[in-house]
Amino acid sequence: MKKDLISIKDLTSKEIEELFNLTDRLKKNKLKFSKALAGKTLALIFQKPSNRTRVSFEVGMYQLGGNAIYLAPGEINLGVRESIKDVAKTLSRYIDGVVLRTFEHKNVMEFANSATVPVINGLSDFSHPCQGIADVYTIREKLKKLKGVTLAYVGDGNNVCNSLLFACAKIGINMNVGAPKGYEPEPLVLKDAKDFAKAKKSDINLFNDPIEALKGADVIYTDVWASMGQEEEAAERKKIFRDFQVNARLASLAKNNALIMHCLPAHRGEEITDEVLDGPNSVVFDQAENRMHVQKAILIKLLS
Ligand code: CP
Ligand code: NVA
């Protein structure tokens, strides 16, 4: 049976821990895995722009001895030139795995249901699982613990927030979300995350006040206020999210030396200021680097 990575919700805590352990080994001994996916080809179907996801998957695949083919939005024209189902069935005859970056989450599920090879969600409007796993891995690497750690996510209850909720809950990190009214994560995501957290004896909390969310936080996380596809809402969102900007004053409300995280790309001067993003506690580029290491572990688990 092929296995996909569509949402962290579908992973067990044990599977996430196994990914972390394999990532540790991959980081320590790159050469040992240089033939792990020899002869395998990964297709990257992207309907939105990307720096980190595309490059880290392509380079990761090469480092494992395999190949990657990037298919830009106009190329496959998913669902327009050809139905999602037919693209998935055709590509399954050529390649060994697919990373799909799309708008509607249901497209990823439809693709995965028709593909006979593993499908990895490279970001949909609902979730960004590779990001969430790499983020928790980064926290584990930097703080050397997960139990008792509190992450405060300040900003839009978007795809990245959803994946962090699942990742933190499954691994036992406490998470506070501070989002404006009307921009909170979906109630069902919060409910699921709370249920997963209960099993790990950790807490998930929602606030509409960023100050409340930051109390006692070991990690401060933010993301853009307008995600890809929401560009026309950007001006309105700038006003609504104004008090949620992670600047030095807001950051000082968390614990001393709290880690600063952002999935990137950042809109400097909007959701985060230069002084915080470039400050001594920022780990944003380690996060970006870890995307590649964690994804190599994901590729080995799903494709080999
Ligand atoms: N964080 C992330 O997924 O970045 P890209 O959009 O550049 O891939
Ligand atoms: N929430 C952002 C994340 C980008 C990596 C977006 O979807 O555009």
Image: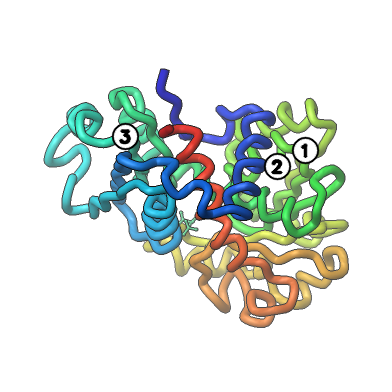
Q: Which mark is residue 152?
A: none
Answer with left or right where residue 1 lies relative to residue 30.
left
Q: Which residue is mark 3?
A: 96
Q: Residue furthest left?
A: 81
> Residue placed at 34% from the left, 36% from the top?
97
| Dot 2 crowding, Cα within 10 Å, few <14, some 14–19, many 20+ | many
Answer with left or right where residue 28 lies relative to residue 298.
right
Where does the image place residue 212, in percent across and percent down from the top left? 82, 56
Give amino acid for label 2. Cys
Colour logic: rainbow
Looking at the picture, tell me which residue is in the foreground, 110 or 270: 110
Give amino acid for label 3. Asp
Answer with left or right where residue 131 lies relative to residue 4.
right
Q: Quadrant of residue 88?
A: top left
* CB within 8 Å, label 2 to label 3: no
* Relative to 17, residue 221 above or below: below
* CB within 8 Å, label 1 to label 2: yes
Q: Which residue is mark 1?
A: 172
The CA distance from mark 1 to mark 2 is 6 Å
Q: Which residue is mark 2?
A: 168
Mark 2 or mark 3, earlier in chain: 3
* Relative to 195, residue 50 above or below: below
